[in-house]
Image (cartoon, rainbow, N blue to C red):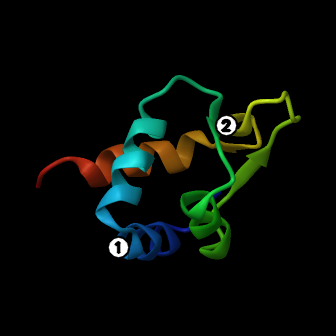
Amino acid sequence: MADEAALTTWWRGLTPDQRARAVAIATRPAPRGMAIDDLTASMVLAGLPTSRQVWTGQPEHLAEMLDEVAGFVLAADRPA
Protein backbone atom coordinates (compact mmCIF):
# COMPACT_ATOMS: atom_id res chain seq x y z
CA MET A 1 0.00 0.00 0.00
CA ALA A 2 1.40 3.39 -0.98
CA ASP A 3 1.54 6.18 1.56
CA GLU A 4 -0.61 9.17 0.52
CA ALA A 5 2.16 11.61 1.47
CA ALA A 6 4.67 9.69 -0.67
CA LEU A 7 2.25 9.74 -3.61
CA THR A 8 1.64 13.47 -3.24
CA THR A 9 5.35 14.29 -2.94
CA TRP A 10 6.13 12.11 -5.94
CA TRP A 11 3.38 13.73 -8.07
CA ARG A 12 4.51 17.24 -7.20
CA GLY A 13 8.07 16.41 -8.26
CA LEU A 14 7.12 15.16 -11.73
CA THR A 15 7.75 17.22 -14.82
CA PRO A 16 4.75 18.00 -17.06
CA ASP A 17 5.97 15.32 -19.50
CA GLN A 18 6.25 12.74 -16.71
CA ARG A 19 2.77 13.61 -15.48
CA ALA A 20 1.35 13.19 -18.98
CA ARG A 21 3.04 9.79 -19.31
CA ALA A 22 1.82 8.74 -15.85
CA VAL A 23 -1.76 9.64 -16.80
CA ALA A 24 -1.45 7.76 -20.11
CA ILE A 25 -0.24 4.67 -18.24
CA ALA A 26 -2.84 5.02 -15.47
CA THR A 27 -5.72 5.05 -17.96
CA ARG A 28 -4.71 1.66 -19.40
CA PRO A 29 -6.36 -1.50 -18.12
CA ALA A 30 -4.27 -3.57 -15.71
CA PRO A 31 -1.64 -4.77 -16.01
CA ARG A 32 -0.20 -1.35 -16.82
CA GLY A 33 3.19 -2.14 -18.28
CA MET A 34 5.88 0.52 -18.04
CA ALA A 35 9.38 0.87 -19.45
CA ILE A 36 12.23 1.30 -17.00
CA ASP A 37 12.76 5.02 -17.54
CA ASP A 38 12.87 8.25 -15.56
CA LEU A 39 9.18 7.99 -14.60
CA THR A 40 9.56 4.45 -13.26
CA ALA A 41 12.77 5.43 -11.48
CA SER A 42 10.96 8.33 -9.81
CA MET A 43 8.33 5.90 -8.48
CA VAL A 44 10.99 3.59 -7.07
CA LEU A 45 12.90 6.49 -5.49
CA ALA A 46 9.67 7.75 -3.90
CA GLY A 47 9.13 4.33 -2.35
CA LEU A 48 5.95 3.67 -4.32
CA PRO A 49 4.96 0.06 -4.97
CA THR A 50 5.58 -1.43 -8.40
CA SER A 51 5.34 -4.97 -9.67
CA ARG A 52 8.09 -6.56 -11.69
CA GLN A 53 7.00 -8.40 -14.79
CA VAL A 54 8.74 -11.06 -16.81
CA TRP A 55 10.77 -9.77 -19.75
CA THR A 56 8.83 -10.45 -22.93
CA GLY A 57 11.09 -8.65 -25.36
CA GLN A 58 9.04 -5.48 -25.03
CA PRO A 59 10.51 -2.80 -22.73
CA GLU A 60 7.09 -1.73 -21.47
CA HIS A 61 6.76 -5.12 -19.79
CA LEU A 62 9.54 -4.57 -17.25
CA ALA A 63 7.45 -2.92 -14.53
CA GLU A 64 3.80 -2.33 -13.77
CA MET A 65 1.91 0.66 -12.33
CA LEU A 66 -0.32 -0.81 -9.63
CA ASP A 67 -4.00 0.06 -9.21
CA GLU A 68 -3.52 2.29 -6.15
CA VAL A 69 -0.89 4.42 -7.90
CA ALA A 70 -3.01 4.62 -11.06
CA GLY A 71 -6.04 5.68 -9.01
CA PHE A 72 -4.02 8.42 -7.34
CA VAL A 73 -2.64 9.65 -10.68
CA LEU A 74 -6.08 9.87 -12.24
CA ALA A 75 -7.49 11.70 -9.19
CA ALA A 76 -4.53 14.09 -9.02
CA ASP A 77 -4.86 14.90 -12.72
CA ARG A 78 -8.48 16.00 -12.41
CA PRO A 79 -9.00 19.76 -12.17
CA ALA A 80 -10.00 20.92 -8.70
| Residue type highlighted by circle 2 | Glu
- Residue occupied by mark 1: 12
x and y, in percent, of residue 21 in the image: 42, 47
Q: Residue furthest left?
A: 80
- Vertical arrangement, residue 29 with respect to residue 55, above or below: above
Q: Viewed as shown, does residue 66 lie left or right of 61?
A: left
What residue is drawn where x is 20% and y is 47%? 78
Viewer-proximal residue, 12 or 56? 56
Instruction: Classify 10 Å Cα crowding around label 2: few (below 14), some (14-19), many (20 and above).
Output: some
Q: Nearer the viewer, mark 1 or mark 2?
A: 2
Viewer-proximal residue, 50 or 19? 19
Q: Label 1, secondary structure: give it.
A: helix
What residue is drawn where x is 53% and y is 22%? 29
What residue is drawn where x is 35% and y is 57%? 17
Quadrant holding the N terminus: bottom right
x and y, in percent, of residue 19 in the image: 36, 56
Instruction: Of the two numbered discs 1 and 2 on the same chain, state the one appearing first in sequence.
Output: 1
